[in-house]
Amino acid sequence: MPLPKGRLHFRSNLVGVRIVLVEDNLQLANSVAEGLGEDGYAVEVVDTAAKAIARGLRRDLDLMILDLGLPDRDGIEVLKELRGAHIHVPVLVLTARDAIDSRVAALEAGADDYLVKPFAFAELVARIAALVRRAGGPRWAPAHELPIVMRDDLVIEATGTGGAITVSLSPREYALLGCLLRRPGEVVTRAEILREAFGYDFDPGTNVIDVHLTHLRKKLSGFPVAIETVRGAGIRLTVAE
């Protein structure tokens, strides 16, 4: 397995962030853990899917970096099991699988980001920082005239046609909805969504927005809002009359 390219380190302002690196290639795992440790992160390495799931269920992580090619189970199954248990820790998939189908499958299973090996170490650190900032940033409440309340525990609530409704969101879904709720009725460009909800100043080369939009639309069924795609322009959230 190739080692990460460009071992350029820089001091992170997220010192003490707890990361679990799920990687069965010991040489690569040690290299990444050492580099992240030098940048101030607290890194724990596990080498199987079973250990990754057990560690994730403890609910005390800030980030999981997940390889897909694990010796006991596929990493996609780890994602599905954690998300099924309502574990919303940000997950960065770090894998040699570069096919679009693999990227889409991981995102649909609940991954927050996807980076292909071999990779530039500086990019890995930048993506980690973006994910942690987005998940741990200050929560906010939409203006009082909007029909949705966004709680600190990633739950949203509203009054729908059948009465009070609540639903739990992933950190990315929460950030995406928040981005749209800040500008109800306006078209928000994909570049703005990538920057404000996903922490990217560049296009990661996947359909990450569409995957999370699909999940979000399903969860918003019954809520008094609708999300529409404006072809060639962006995404717009509308509020029911």
Image (cartoon, grey):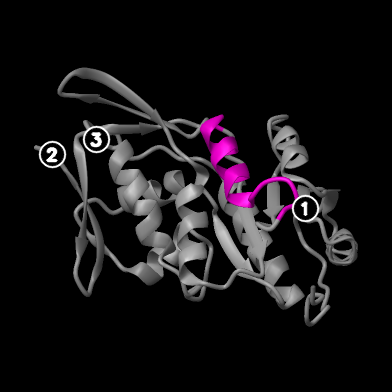
Disc number at residue 64? none
Q: Quadrant of the C terminus?
A: top left
What is the spatial separation of the Cα atoms under label 3 and label 1, in whole angstroms?
35 Å
Of circles 3 and 1, the one toward us is 1
Q: Which residue ends up furthest to the bottom in the rendered image?
A: 6
Eyeballing the image, is 116 above or below 67? below
Q: Amino acid at mark 2?
A: Ala
Q: Which element is circle 3 on?
A: loop
Q: Residues within 10 Å of mark 2 (few under 14, many from 20)?
A: few
Which of 199/61 is in front? 61
Q: Earlier in the sequence, mark 3 or mark 2?
A: 3
Q: Residue at x 46, y 65 (%)?
A: 101
Of circles 2 and 1, the one toward us is 1
Question: Which range is magenta?
Answer: 70-86
What is the spatial separation of the Cα atoms under label 2 and label 1, in whole angstroms?
43 Å
The residue to which callout 1 is attached is 21
Q: Amino acid at mark 1?
A: Leu
The residue to which callout 2 is attached is 240
The residue to which callout 3 is attached is 221
Q: Residue at x 58, y 50 (%)?
A: 76
Of circles 3 and 2, the one toward us is 3
Residue 111: percent from the left, percent from the top?
A: 54, 52
Visible residue check, residue 150: yes
Residue 200: percent from the left, percent from the top?
A: 52, 68
Contact, CB < 8 Å: mark 3 with mark 1? no
Residue 90: percent from the left, percent from the top?
A: 61, 48
Q: Amino acid at mark 3?
A: Ser
Q: Which element is circle 2 on?
A: loop
Which of 194/186 is in front? 194
Contact, CB < 8 Å: mark 2 with mark 1? no
What is the spatial separation of the Cα atoms under label 3 and label 2, in whole angstroms?
12 Å
